[in-house]
Image: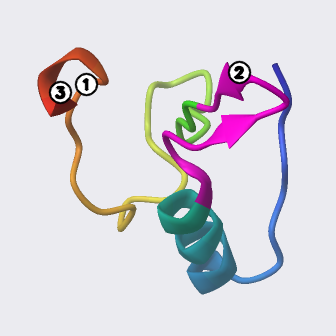
Amino acid sequence: MAYVTFAKPEDAVSAYEALDRKSFQGRLLHILPAVNRKGKVEVEDVGKKRSLKGRS
């Protein structure tokens, strides 16, 4: 698990689109936007919000 902070929201979206569901050192990456303690999503324009199970 890791947290990554981006200076520009569009860079975060690009990283999400490029890396979500990709293999890294033999493991599947599943990227989720961070949520603050109140439950609000920090980056709201991430794209399609479907579970990993629903994408097969």
Q: Earlier in the sequence, mark 2 or mark 1?
A: 2
Residue 48 lies in what quarter of the image? bottom left
Identify the image quadrant of residue 24: top right
Compared to residue 24, the image places residue 6 above or below, namely below
- Horizontal side of residue 36 vs 1, given as left or right: left
Confirm or deny contact between disc 2 and disc 1 (CB under 8 A).
Answer: no
Report helix, strand or loop for mark 3: loop
Q: Nearer the viewer, residue 47 or 56?
A: 56
Q: Position of residue 4 (x, y in %)?
A: 84, 49
Q: Nearer the viewer, residue 25 or 21?
A: 25
Q: Residue at x 20, y 35 (%)?
A: 50
Q: Quadrant of the C terminus?
A: top left
Instruction: State how far apart marks 2 and 1 are (Cα).
Output: 17 Å
In the drawing, what numbered circle is on residue 51? 1
Q: Amino acid at mark 2?
A: Arg
Please name whichever residue, 12 or 56, is drawn nearer the observer in this view of the structure. 56
Mark 1 lies on a secondary structure that is loop
Q: Decide: marks 2, 3 in contact (CB < 8 A)?
A: no
Q: Amino acid at mark 1?
A: Ser
Specify few, some or many for label 2: CA neighbours under 10 Å numbering under 14, 14-19, or 20 or more.
few
Examine the rendered structure and indicate whether residue 14 appears above or below residue 5: below
Rendering coords of residue 32 (x, y %): 53, 35
User: Which residue is rendered at x = 57% and y = 38% of the image?
Assistant: 31
Residues drawn in magenta: 19-29
Q: Which residue is mark 3?
A: 56
Indicate the amino acid at tag 3. Answer: Ser
Are there few (<14), some (14-19), or many (20+) residues within 10 Å of tag 1?
A: few
Q: Pointer 2: what residue?
A: 27
